[in-house]
Each structure stands twice: as C-alpha cells, then as structure tokens.
Image (cartoon, rainbow, N blue to C red):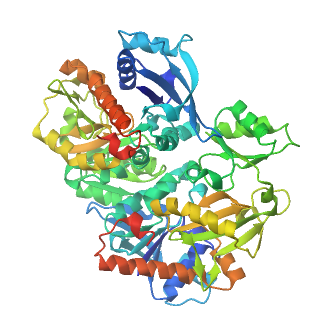
Amino acid sequence: MRIGFLVNDIETERAGYTTVRLAMTAANRGHDVWFINAGDFAFDTDEKIRARARTTSGKKYKTTVSYLKVLKSETAKVERITVDELDILMLRIDPADETGQRAWAKTAGIIFGNVALRSGVIVLNDPTALAGALDKMYMQLLPQNIRPRTLISCDRDEIKAFVRDQGGVAVLKGFQGTGSQAVFMVTEGNRANLNQMIDAIVRYGYVIAQEYLPASERGSVRLFLVNGEPLRYKGKVAAFQWVRTGEGMRANIHEPGQTEAVKLTDAHFHIAEAVRPRLVQDGMFLAGLEIIDDKLIDIDVFSPGGLGTAQLFEKVNFNEAVIHALEQKVDYMAYYRRRFDNVDMATL
Amino acid sequence: MRLGLFVNDVMTEFAAYTTTRLALTATNRGDEVWYFSAPDFTYGVDEKIHAHGTSVAKKKYNSQSAYLADLQSPQAVKQTVVIDDFDVLMLRSDPSIDTGSRVWAQTAGISFGRAAMRRGVVVLNDPEGLLKAMNKMYFQHFPEEVRPQTLISRNRDDIKSFIAEVGGNAVIKPLSGSGGTGVFMATVDDRSNINQMIDTLIRDGYVIAQEYLTAASEGDTRLFMMNGRPLRHRGKYAAFRRLRLGEDLRSNIHAGGKKAKAEITEAHLRLAEIVRPKLVQDGMFLVGLDIVGDKLMEINVFSPGGLGSAQQFEKVNFNDAVINALHRKVAYMSYYHRNFANVEMAML
C-alpha cells in the first residue's frame, strides 16, 4: 500500500514516537511510506492535492533510530507526490504543539485531508471528526457517567461556586486545548490564589473546572483503541500505567514520567465500551484513552502515543496490529473500487 | 418562539446589522429573543447549557436603532437562561473579527451549539457544517466550474508561477480566516511587491492564489440563499449589487463599496442551483453568495449581512421571510417532539 504520515515537522519527530514505529513497521513490510510536513501540501490547479514528501530507499530497518536517521538525512528521497493517489493518509499532527505564528498548522491535515478523501484516500482519523475534537467539548459529547463532574464557563462566580461545591478541591484547565496549557489544582491550602488561577486561563477563553479524582495520586492508565475497540494483539491489550512522580500540580492529567505495566479491570473495558459508539460514528480509527479509576479524563484522537511503551510491558509488537488493520482497509477499498464513505471505512 | 442570537459581542452590534433586523422582526411578532456574546455560555454540572442572556424590555419597536439602544443600555434585561429550552439558536458571530487573544471566541458558538442541538434546539447554521467552513478550503468543495482557477500552497515559487500562468493578475489571500483581511491583488503593473505580498501571507500559513476575474472590476452581486434556495419573498429575490469604488479590490461593504439594485440572471440562478446540494448536506440555512460574472467569489455562511440593503432596493421585508422559515421549523419540531437531526431541520 501507499501510505502517508502527516506530522508537525519531520525534524521534530523522535525515534520513540509511535508515528515513527508505525512508519517503520509499514516500510519493513514492503509498503511505500511517505512523511509529509504540515506546510508541504498544495491544492493544485488540476484540483489535486500534492505534497513534498520524504521516503527511505526500501531496505529493512532494525531500529527506529536508524530508520529515522535515514529519513532525515540527505539520502532520503524527496518528491512531490500526488496525495490523491495514496491509499491511506494518517493525520498525526499534534495541534497542541502548534501555537503562536504556527497556529495554522493545527488544522493543515484536517483541511487538506478533507479534500483528499474525495479521491478515495482513506484519511485517518476522519478529518471532519478531528475538526470537532479541537476543543474539550468533544469529551462532553461522551456519556456523562464516565466523565468527572465538570463545569465549563468564563464566569468567575460560577467557577468559584463549583469549587465550593466540590469541597474546595478542584482542577482548573483550559477548554481550548491549545491557548493556555496551565492546569491548576485548587486545594484548601491555595484557595487564596483562586482568582489568579482563573485569570491565567480565562485570558485564553473558557475554563474547565473539574472534580478532583483522588485516584489521580497514583497516576493514570493509557488504553489504545483501534477501530473503536481496545487494541488487542496476540492476547495482549495495548495499555500501560503512568506513575505520578513528585509534587506536580497537574492533577487529572498525565505527566511524562515513569511508566509501568497495568492490569486492566472491568472499569477500563466499560469505559472503552461506552465511548465506542461515538468513536465509530465519528470515524476515529486510532484513539488513546486516559483513565483514572473509573473515569475518562482525556481522549487523544490526534496523535496518541505510547505504543512502544505498551510493547515494552506486554512484549508484543502492537505496531503490526495497527498496520494489519490498515492493510485490511486497503483490501476493502480495492473490492469497492475506492467508493466508500471515509467515516465508515475508518473503523471497519 | 424562543430565539437565541449568538453574536461576537452584544455591545459591538450595529442597528443596521441583519442580526438586529431579524431580532426586531421576531420581537415585534411576539417572539422571545435573547442575545448572547462569546463568553456568555456555561456547560453546567447538570449537563445543560446555560447562558447569560440580554434582552429588551419592550414588546414593540419602531426602529432598529431604538431596539439596539435598549439592548445595549443598562436597562436591558439580563438573565441566566437555559439554552436547552430554546427553540432556535442562530449562530451569527463573525469569526474573522475574533483574532489575537480572542481567537478562542471563533468557535465558541460552534462548540456550545453542538452540545445544545443534542437537546433538540435547532441550531443555525448547523454547527458541524460551520466547523467545516472555518477556513476557505470549504469553498473548494463546491463544483470546479463555479469557482475561479485556484492554487493553495505555501511555496513562493509555485505561487509566482501560478500568477504568471493566469496572465499576471491574481488575488492572493490567507487560507484561514474570512472577510477582507490580508487580501492582496497581484497585477502585471506591480511585479516589484509580489515577493513581499506572498511572504507576508506565507508567514501565517497557507496562501490561496486565485485568477482575477476581469468582471470583478464592475463589482459583485450578493444573493441570499435560505434553506438551500435563493431567498425569495413576494416575488423578489434578496439580492443587491456592490460596486467597486476606486482602487480597492475588496468589494465588500466593510471596504466601503457603493450598492445598487441587482438584476438576477439565469447565470445567477444556475450558480445557486449548483451550490444547493452541498449547502443542504451541510445544513446551511442562511447563506450569502458573492457572484462575479458566472463565478462564485465567496460563500458567507457565518453571519451573512445585507438583508437591509436588499430590502432597500427590492421594497419587501425579507426579515419576515426568514422569521417565517424559523416559525415553520419550530412547528415541525413540535410535531416530532424535538426528535429530528439538526442538519436536516436546518434546511426544511
């Protein structure tokens, strides 16, 4: 198959990234793999989408370090490809990384991907759904009983009343997912700073005030979903535990840090089941759930990472399972001569 | 009918705005009308959308200026209302004026509108349709034959060779954002500034380069579409012409064009017919088409203005027709107990 990976910028990709692992797995299986930067698309006068893209020479790679090194080097092949002729375009831009003058790059994949799918390219995750997931309202469209108690508002008094109702302990963060990256934990001890915390976020838009989950002391669980189901390969599920270290204020979110194996419970699978209908309806092929206890605290549908970490603990290569799923879609599309709705194909 | 009007900011509305005309018409017909500014929404812990609304005290108004003066005065009625109980929420904010630190406001109506429509509020235009239209690529999804020849790229050389190909005259503008900001005209006579113009735009993202239509020197025609068809009331089309004044290529009202009566031709109606399927698919209830010759220059789906200008030349009150259409939707929704897909109700 011919597959394109859209990334923020190839220069900032790292060997440990899930995108690089997926790309190398596909390349080693003999597929034609191209990397595209956010700024390298063009809508040409013949109505086709083209892109300046990079690929490696077609040999096999043992490590993502050597693969990425070749990809970034001058020996990599750089060509202007016709995106409409790809079988699959994977949108792997993390919009949170693109702020200030590069804010335009947040939506480059969504915009050009939406055009490419007219030619029968399978675009994953579905670009229209991704456009609807750029702010945290996407979480609120998932069932209420799997979410922490939440208020979204710009109104200082309402936010304060919420904190009071929660017994003086709550988490405050930005709604936009972009704007302010600040996450505050309000406690009895720092209530005096509540106004300043609200100000720091409200400057960039709406504020999310959320119930504090005591279990967040122990960290959170990442669980991968593919085609709307927990990603299972050779009897193992792609998941791991983030362990909280130190006294960080970033409650209800994960901190990059220590990881360990996780024993998944019924509560985790119940959450996966509860989000499934919405993910299928939206065409979210690959998603990373962030779970604390029996609550979903975040869902990454843009560029979920950590497949390598899951592999480290579970000892199976989940990248292969993802590439299998893509190969299957390309087969389906061949049977139907590329005439199939992208949203439906995304989770088949 | 309980009608909500979402605007950028209640205090920056003008008496002549189409939004004010619609509000006045509905109020005078006995409807309950509330205005909301971008920060006025709250997603409450009860899972409902609440909002700090502003309304007028009197039941009848003789002029838009009296209506708006009351709305913006300290005597205006301020109340927290529950959006879930509304019949219709019209999203009438113009995202192109929310820049810089207010960029979050561009999508506030869309995000909260998506949540509200789950509860049977008719949200217009459909927020998921609007999400697709947040950048100018939306225009490229309409059939090729109604659009000027276009290139979208971030590559300076490609843009320059396109301009040469179309004969040296082209319009260049940013892909993101709408309205007349950042629109440049590259002409054969002025080759010296072309690099600077392109570089200025590339710095902030992708650039659209469009062939210059010579007919544009005579101005353009704005034609309103409602429910996917040309808006017609008492035998008259809601339309008018904007004449170019002097050197400014932006023929829109904000750039100070002069207006005149429009002659709606077969070519205009054919264009309207060609754009209809896509508008219906996306739930675009009220739309302004900008037409030059037999080509479409722009489609305004966010806050199309100029219904008053159309009334001035055609001598019929088109606001009545829009409010009639809303009343009809409210009646439909009551028959179906508010169980109906928003995107379909938008066009019925």
Q: How many marks?
A: 0
Q: Percent x, y for residue B13? A: 59, 70
Q: Is residue A189 left or right of residue B315?
A: left
Residue situated furthest right in the rendering:
B189
Q: Percent x, y for residue B72? A: 56, 76
Q: Percent x, y for residue A272? A: 20, 42
Q: Quadrant of the C terminus of chain A?
A: top left
Q: Percent x, y for residue B71? A: 54, 78
On screen, B335 above or below A163?
A: below
Q: Is residue B188 left or right of residue B82?
A: right
Q: Is residue A283 visible?
A: no
Tell me what residue is drawn at x 30 percent, y 41 percent.
A347
**Residue toward you, B36 or A282:** A282
Tell me what residue is drawn at x 38 percent, y 72 percent.
B80
- The quarter of the picture where residue A28 lies is top left
**Residue toward you, A172 or A139:** A139
Q: Is residue A319 visible?
A: yes
Residue situated furthest left in the rendering:
A266
Q: Is residue A175 left or right of residue A140?
A: right
Tell me what residue is drawn at x 81 percent, y 63 percent.
B218
Tell me what residue is drawn at x 48 percent, y 44 percent.
A118
On screen, A280 above or below B28?
A: above
On screen, B261 above or below A316?
A: below
Q: Is residue A260 left or right of residue B158?
A: left
Q: Quadrant of the N terminus of chain A?
A: top left
